[in-house]
Amino acid sequence: MNENIKSGITFGLIGGLLTFLFGGWSVGVLGVLMGIGLGLALGPRFNPRDGWMSLAKQALPAAAASGAILLVLSLLQNYVIDPAIGQNFEDLDVVIPANLVGVVGGILFTCIVTALHGLSEEWERKGKIILLGLVILAFPFVDKFTELRWTAQIIFALIFVILGLGLNIVVGYAGLLDLGYAAFFAIGAYTTGILSSPQHNIFLNFWLVIWIAAGVGAIFGLILGAPTLPLRGDYLAIVTLGFGEIVPVLFRNLIDVTIKEPLTCWILPLFKIQTACITFMSHEDLTAGEKGINPVGRPILPIIKLNEAMGIELVIKIAVLLVALALITFLYIRIWRNGNRKVGSVASYAAIVAAILIVFLPIPRTRVAVFDNVLGIIQPGEFQSDNPIPWYFLIIAIILLSIFLINRLRESRLGRAWMAIREDELAAAQMGIDPVRTKLLAFAMGATFSGFAGAFYAAYIRGIFPSVFDFSASIIILCCVILGGIGNINGVIVGGLALMTADRLFLPALKDFLKGLLDHTVLPALSSNPTLQAAVGQNANPILYRFLLFGLTLVIMMSVRPEGLVPSAQRRMELHAGEESGGTPVAAK
Amino acid sequence: MLELKDVHTYYGNIHALKGISLKVEKGEIVTLIGSNGAGKSTTLRTIQGINRPRSGSILLEGEALEKLPPHEIALRGVAQSPEGRMIFPRMTVMENLEMGAYARKDKSGFDEDLERVFNLFPRLKERINQKGGTLSGGEQQMLAMGRALMARPRILLLDEPSMGLSPILVELIFEIIQTINKEGTTILLVEQNALMALSIANRGYVIQTGEIVLTDTASKLKANEMVRKSYLGIE
């Protein structure tokens, strides 16, 4: 059978089987996603010189095969699976459009994405970015419309993507194996919790706290990095493991903190000098221990009240924001175009500060009803739990910022120094690289991004509990990095998304699916054997096997594709050098 | 330019260098010859700051190096093409050369030096995008030397540049060392291949179990009976 058709069938099968778990509109969303995936897989197999039209045509058979499989499985889901798991048959006005969107959209997107490969390299890249942007933008709205409720879970996956990106600096770039990275996540989250909750009656704005959390993370990165400096390899990993254990325990126990100034309280009395003992903190409950800090403050933004605003107010609100954005963009581009970098950067900082002030300053009341009404529209509102869309876009923004910063870091002198240290610390020192400074900065930079993630997490969950940050969290973050491809930003994103959506979306859905199947089909059939019935009923919960499945995935990955799902070119070369040249890779030492 | 005064270096309890004193003047090629385990590489490692001398002093144009960490010593213009080459295996040839120039910030000087290195080692230019680890032994040696030159060092320390190379390549490498020296770089050359080393050097030191036992001009050392017997294998 044709290789392309095989791929089409594979993608159709994956999409179709997933519809078994999610049902409803999922076939539409999955169809389109699988179509894009199939297009990405097919594109490079065709000759780009054929032109985009021809490429789209060449992709058609595979796309059609994928669509057909999807349709068959989706109908199977509707007519066979749903009754078997005790679900009602969905309305035809969901089934018909959902299948239509899934099959037609899937085929269409397969052809479009494949056709991109027929364009010039630059346009192919642009086309892919635009397509990706559209998918990212449209996802939460589609999700809301189709009532799949995936966004809230995807946000968790995206938190782990940021954590993975941060850990990737330490492990992937600088080559320092860190088994306690969740400690920095905890530090970011607790900083946020302490600075914006009733725990200490401090209610700082989230937009300020997130930077403080990143900063505190960086400082602790330096502090925890310092003792590991003389260590290498395994020893370093063990020390970081220790930190990963210590930090959550510390947060658990910071419930009765007294800090006294040592000179006046202990040292001077030794010399029989009577002084008043200065106490900084007396029996403070810093972290509320096992109870956790709750509730944590949430971000505010003017557009958040969109749901409440109605009719003309909504229009004005959006118009005001768009005009402001356009103005800032226009000024920004104008000044940068003129080539005066200094003025440009000053102006862009000014624009950012102005934008922040416009967005976050409370708007004064004017006593004139007309003004108040207009101004009231852009009054900031708080992010809410029942509406994941603002959270989604916030975390996407944080990820984009992180990717930008990390790319800049990697290209910088510091990034070069990290790579050199990873390759050979001694040789790096002989190039004039200070190993101490370079390694400390790797820890600090890595911890900065977990500070972002921690702040977001605390605000999103609205509470923080020490059990979240234990060893398993560190390992899961590390798994995301390894699964996706160490040292590669795209790989880490794919790894984080794949692992965490599997954990947050796929396993719970599988659990519900199995439960339905058992209760309605399997268990009644086993009624003659009550022991077996009980055993099957109790053990058929995939969430119980979460870590087993993680472990299994890693073992299989490491043996089949050790460089990760989307490896960096360097690692692929290194791990497969032997296969290509028919010999063992050349070691340099 | 570089002066070692009564340097003692230990590995744990093992007294590896028992009071080494030597001097390299500006523009010279000085060679340090000796058999396996005599302390040649240890001397270089001590100059580089990788091993710390327990006593004695190391002066680079009057400035004491013996208390500085390796990267500080590198920043003061001491570059090394180390034994076993120690190139960055997963970086390309170009990236390796860029790392060599890490300590420098002048872009124009970088381009100039890059051209100079490619003139000396045309092979490197051919392999510019290849990973360091996939080069042949001779090419790795060239890369290590090129990388050291990219730092535009005041003094270049070469540790066994002939190790593991074919005789033709050894000759080529030694010719290049002479060229580098003529272009104005001072060189301290450590070699087992004493005949080759002495034929290009101005002066030489003979090291035996951690002590300098003999020093003279290269041509006189070549004629010295002890050297001829022990290191040149000529009766």
Image: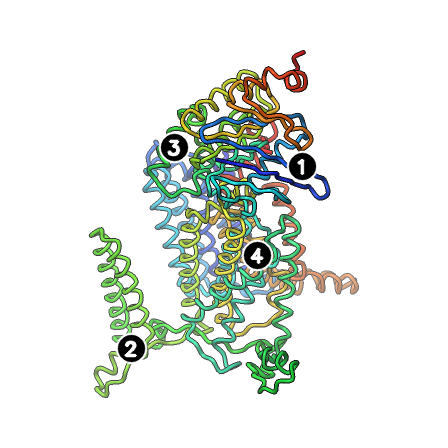
Secondary-structure class at tag 2? helix
Residue named by callout 1? B18
A402 sits to left or right of A507: left
Tag in front: 3 or 4? 3
Residue holding disc 3: B113
Separation of residues labelled 3 and 4 (CA atoms): 43 Å
Q: Residue at x 34, y 31 (%)?
A: A49
Report the chain holding disc 4: A
Q: Quadrant of residue B150?
A: top left
Residue contact between numbered discs 1 and 2, judged by CB atoms under 8 Å: no
Seen from the viewer's position, the closer of residues B197 and A120 is B197
Front of the two marks 2 and 4: 4
Q: Pointer 3: residues within 10 angstroms few (<14), some, or many (20+)?
A: some
Q: Is residue A75 visible?
A: no
Residue A267 in the image: state x and y as whole percent: 63, 78
Where does label 2 land, which residue? A377
